[in-house]
Amino acid sequence: MESVFRTYGQGQNTVTVLRSINFDVMAGEIVSLVGKSGSGKSTLLHLAGIMDYPTAGEVYIEKKVTSNLAPKQRAEIRRNSIGFVFQFFHLLPQLSVFENISLPQLMKGANNIEDRTNELLEVVGMSSHASRFPGELSGGEMQRVAVARAVANKPRLILADEPTGNLDKDSGQVVLDLLMRSARMYDSALLLVTHDSETARLCDRVITIEEGTLSAH
Ligand SMILES: Nc1ncnc2c1ncn2[C@@H]1O[C@H](COP(=O)(O)OP(=O)(O)OP(=O)(O)O)[C@@H](O)[C@H]1O
Ligand SMILES: [Mg+2]
């Protein structure tokens, strides 16, 4: 990100959430983003995942400018190169657990989709729930499925918005291991939002967001 601003609202109601953010995550790097509720963590992640446009500044993916790309090209980058774990999961309610994890692979035209999906179900301990629908899962189970879906395509960039927020210690560890292992194994960049200092300690770098700006420590 280069000189990225993001404001919401207009006129007197304008709120500047991000002000002149300069920030990179390199391939193979695991970075955690911490900050108070409302500080702009999700906003920053959505911009990094090119799901949103900065008010000013530029977001680069693999050194390429993204603001001038057509929506279709942006969607293609998201599909092929980015895995996103949303804060509120966004599983597709009409699709089973198995289908939710398979979908990004189908969209990418991947091979061995069934094997890869079964492998991920096993890793996150959801094999026995493969044919259930999201509405039949607990919050933590949805979260595990969302993480499996995000890494299914071995993306170059994994963005995870509080991926362990709803999980007990053991399940949280499983999810975190999967994200970190996926990043290390495929030399992907991993940027994850966390409130947990223990999780942050396991990362290569910790970035804090406060009053619209970032600081490293
Ligand atoms: N669409 C929007 N319109 C107006 N304001 C918004 C919008 N989305 C977010 N905001 C505001 O921007 C600020 C940052 O929101 P954001 O969701 O990025 O925070 P966060 O750090 O992810 O918080 P949390 O830890 O609670 O998830 C908040 O003050 C929020 O109210
Ligand atoms: Mg958030």
Image: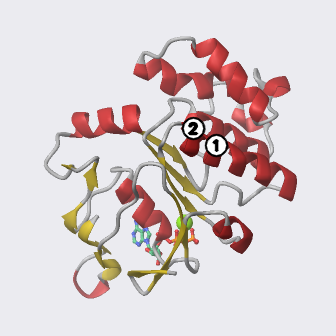
Question: As displayed, is residue 164 above or below residue 125?
Answer: below
Badge 2: residue crowd in 10 Å (few <14, some 14–19, many ≥20): few
Position of the N terminus by quadrant: bottom left
Q: x and y percent of residue 94 in the render?
A: 62, 27
Question: As displayed, is residue 212 above or below residue 96?
Answer: below
Q: x and y percent of residue 71 in the render?
A: 23, 40
Farthest-out residue, left: 68
Residue 181 circle label = 1
Q: Are marks 1 and 2 in contact (CB under 8 Å)?
A: yes
Question: As displayed, is residue 160 above or below residue 105?
Answer: below
Mark 1 CB near ligand 2 (8 Å cut): no
Q: Distance between the Cα atoms at labels 1 and 2?
A: 6 Å
All told, the count of numbered labels is: 2
Q: Amino acid at mark 1?
A: Arg
Q: x and y percent of residue 176 in the render?
A: 69, 51
Side of 42 relative to 4 (left or right): right
Q: Amino acid at mark 2?
A: Met
Q: x and y percent of residue 101 in the render?
A: 61, 28
Rendered residue at 25%/77% (across/down): 10
Rendered residue at 57%/15% (across/down): 113
Mark 2 lies on a secondary structure that is helix
Badge 1: residue crowd in 10 Å (few <14, some 14–19, many ≥20): few
Side of 87 relative to 128 (left or right): left
Q: How is the image coloured?
A: secondary structure
Residue 135 circle label = none
Rendered residue at 31%/32% (across/down): 76
Mark 1 lies on a secondary structure that is helix
Mark 2 CB near ligand 2 (8 Å cut): no
Of residues 25 and 5, the one nearer the viewer is 25
Residue 185 circle label = 2
